[in-house]
Amino acid sequence: MRNNGSDSSTNSPLDTFSTTHSKIPLNEYPKDLSTTDADFINGANEPHKIYEGTQEDVSDKNTITAEQGFNEAVIKLLVLLYQIDGKVTLTEQDLFDEIIATLNWHSGVSISAFINGAIHQARVAIDQLKAREYLFKLGTGLNYNPAQALEYAMDITEIDGKRSEEEIELLALLSNRVLARGLVE
């Protein structure tokens, strides 16, 4: 630390900063640091210009949002499919973990917390006999990449060696109704 010729034990870093920077004339500060409320009211700094050029940022966020919507819908789909037959095998869990590792996760919620929520939601849908309705709600997110969603669904339902009747029913619903338009395009 610089002591400017004085005893360093009596000067704190804040004292040194204040002494050094108080000598800078106000007109030599960068404009954005010397802005007053009156400058904004009178339009001197044109605060709306802060938002210029951010349209690209917004469209990038929409792309990320669509991808994130797909990621979330895929997780919910996979959890529903591996739980629908009433048993979760280690091979299903391993494949689920492999798929999850490939997702480009962009959320303020951790992926593990999201998965815990998806497990609960799927369990409730299954217990209330509303798995079909739950699957339909995933349609928008899954149609971001319908071929990939169907591939994941096929893989998770065949990994344990046999597809249950419930899995076959949900796969048919998925391919013929939920993803049909996206798969044809």
Image (cartoon, grey):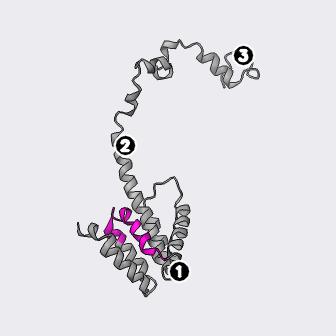
Residue at 38% over, 33% down? 51
Q: Is residue 103 above or below residue 107?
A: below
Q: Residue under label 3, please give it.
A: 6
Residue 95 appears at what percent x and percent y? 46, 75
Q: Secondary structure at mark 2?
A: helix
Report the front residue among 25 and 127: 127
Instruction: Return the disc, 3 or 1, that comes first in the chain's sequence.
Output: 3
Image check: 68 left or right of 12? left
| Front position among marks 3 and 2 | 2
**Crowdedness near tag 2: few (<14), some (14–19) or many (≥20) residues, C-alpha within 10 Å:** few
Query: Looking at the picture, which amino acid does disc 1 mark?
Result: Val
Q: Is residue 163 above or below residue 43?
A: below
Q: Which residues are magenta?
A: 129-149
Mark 3 and mark 2: Cα distance apart in space: 50 Å
Q: Residue under label 2, please give it.
A: 57
Q: Residue under label 1, please give it.
A: 88
- The prevailing secondary structure element of the residues shown in magenta is helix
Q: Image quadrant of residue 81?
A: bottom left
Instruction: Return the disc, 1 or 2, that comes first in the chain's sequence.
Output: 2
**Crowdedness near tag 1: few (<14), some (14–19) or many (≥20) residues, C-alpha within 10 Å:** some
Mark 1 and mark 2: Cα distance apart in space: 41 Å
- Name the residue furthest left: 185
Label 3 with label 2: CB-CB less than 8 Å: no
Mark 3 and mark 1: Cα distance apart in space: 73 Å
